Amino acid sequence: MTPENTPHKENDPLRGKRVLIVDDDICNVFCFEETLKHLSNRNNLNLTIFTAHSGKEALKLLESGETIDLLVTDCNMGEKSGPRLIGDIKALSLKKGFEYLASMAIIMASARFYADSAEKQAQEYGADTGFAKPVNPKIVFEKAREIFRSRLQKAT
């Protein structure tokens, strides 16, 4: 089932999630943000979407106390790469008040990933899953839904 024809459900695991999109390519950020806004509105999910144009900017947002449920990040950014960002987030999650970061879902995308091994490569960096660019934001949306649905099933 694609996001466009997914039935409206009160128990959608993405409902109310706070998403941070991180990429140093403004076109990628815009594409992801607009597509997620559209899918959120269409599916009545009330997603809150934040953007950052570098890993450093993303980390600063997280350090400010902004609660994020899902991080969608580029792997290869100049100022702070996706893998370095994930490492910094893991370290930050050990500090008092930031423990929730340990359970934040992370999706990584990279032009350097091979399509058939992107998930494994991203997981080696600490992400839940990964995609080779170019990425279809609708597929990322569905994968995020799967991650949160799986986590809910494990919790029950």
Image (tube, rainbow, N blue to C red):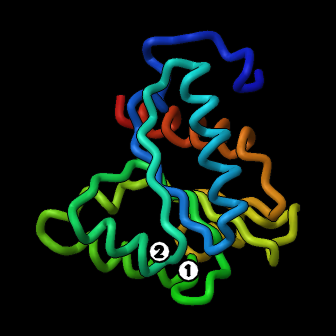
Instruction: From the viewer's perspective, tell me whether residue 131 is left or right of residue 100.
Output: right
Residue at 77%, 65% in the rendered image? 118
Q: Nearer the viewer, residue 62 or 90?
A: 62
Q: Is residue 58 left or right of residue 8?
A: left
**In this picture, is 110 found above or below 146?**
below
Q: Position of residue 156 (x, y in %)?
A: 35, 28
Amino acid type assigned to the residue bearing label 1 in the image: Pro
Q: Quadrant of residue 47?
A: top left
Q: Which mark is residue 86?
A: 2
Vertical placement of 22 versus 148: above or below? below
Closer to the camera in the image, 50 or 67 = 50
Spatial separation of the CA atoms under disc 1 and disc 2: 5 Å
**x then y, percent, for residue 134:** 83, 60
- For label 2, the SS is helix
Q: Could you tell me if the residues under marks 1 and 2 are in contact, i.e. CB atoms within 8 Å?
A: yes
For the N terminus, which image quadrant?
top right
The image's mark for residue 10 is: none
Residue 94 percent coordinates (x, y): 23, 73
